[in-house]
Amino acid sequence: MLTVTGLTVIRGRGRQQHCVRLPHLELAAGQILAVTGQSGCGKSTLLEALGLLLKPEQVEVFQLGQPSIDLAALQRAEKESQLAQIRAQHLGFVLQSGGLLPYLNVRDNIQLPRRILGLAAESERIEQAIVTLNLEHLLNKRPSALSIGERQRVACLRAIAHEPQLLLADEPTAALDPHSARRLFEVFLDMVNALQLSALVVSHDWALVKSFNLPILQAHSEPGESTFALV
């Protein structure tokens, strides 16, 4: 589903420059990797590059999907409109803050990615997920009326509403208490498996990651540089 080789991303300049490297990664459909490492090592930067939000300094192979899309070739050719379309259609994002639009109610937030792509607003799988996440009674409420945990459940569902091929989550449980974090993680894994997505989840909660026995893509950091590898 996702194959990356020789990815290098550079942030900052001079003494503030930090290089993030991903020598090789293969991610299959239905597979989830936890991305871990010390604060400031470049976990979010890596997700931004894989999410087509940040152009890498160098990448040898960058392929997504079945049939495979050659993202590296599109980036080298600076095909920004095509990359934007791929990002909207094939990628899903879960942010630490949730990122819900405050002026839309829960149902409209969930349906937004599908409407943007011209898909039917509702789907059987998403309706089932609404029930699984216990969101039925919240559908007409605005994000401001929700708890942090409720907002994160909605954000997770919105990220998969258009059934993308790759899901990228940046600290989705960071603001939750341990019980809520574990419950959200359980549902998150179930949805990824049910839809056969590929997923990368940045997490600082190593105990939570280990309790689910997830494969780990860990940062090995030196001054000015981090290299991510499976452990």
Image: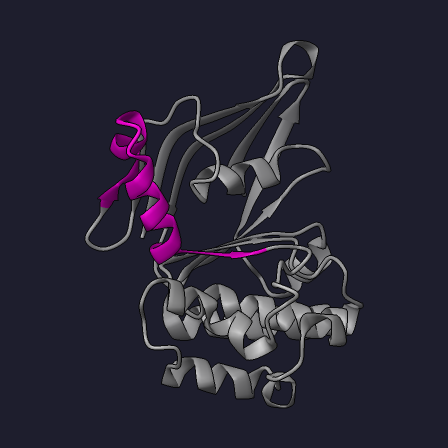
Report x, y in % for residue 212: 60, 65
Residue furthest left in the image: 67
Quarter-of-image position of residue 106: bottom right
The correct choice, above or below, for 167 with respect to 110 in the image is above
Q: Which residue is painted at 53% across and 83% down in the image?
A: 130
Report x, y in % for residue 35: 58, 47
Can see residue 147? yes
In the displayed structure image, the side of residue 178 where residue 222 appears, left or right: left
The correct choice, above or below, for 129 with respect to 176 in the image is below
Majority SS type along the magenta span = helix
Report x, y in % for residue 64: 30, 47
In the displayed structure image, the side of residue 162 where residue 110 appears, left or right: right
Task: State how many labels appear.
Answer: 0
The correct choice, above or below, for 144 with respect to 209 in the image is below
Report x, y in % for residue 158: 51, 68
Q: Which residue is painted at 48% across and 34% down in the image?
A: 54
Q: Look at the image and say whether residue 86 sits in the magenta stretch.
A: yes
Can see residue 162? no
Magenta residues, as a range?
69-94
Q: Which residue is painted at 65% across and 9% down in the image?
A: 14
- The quarter in which the C terminus is drawn is top right
Residue furthest front in the image: 103
Residue furthest right in the image: 177
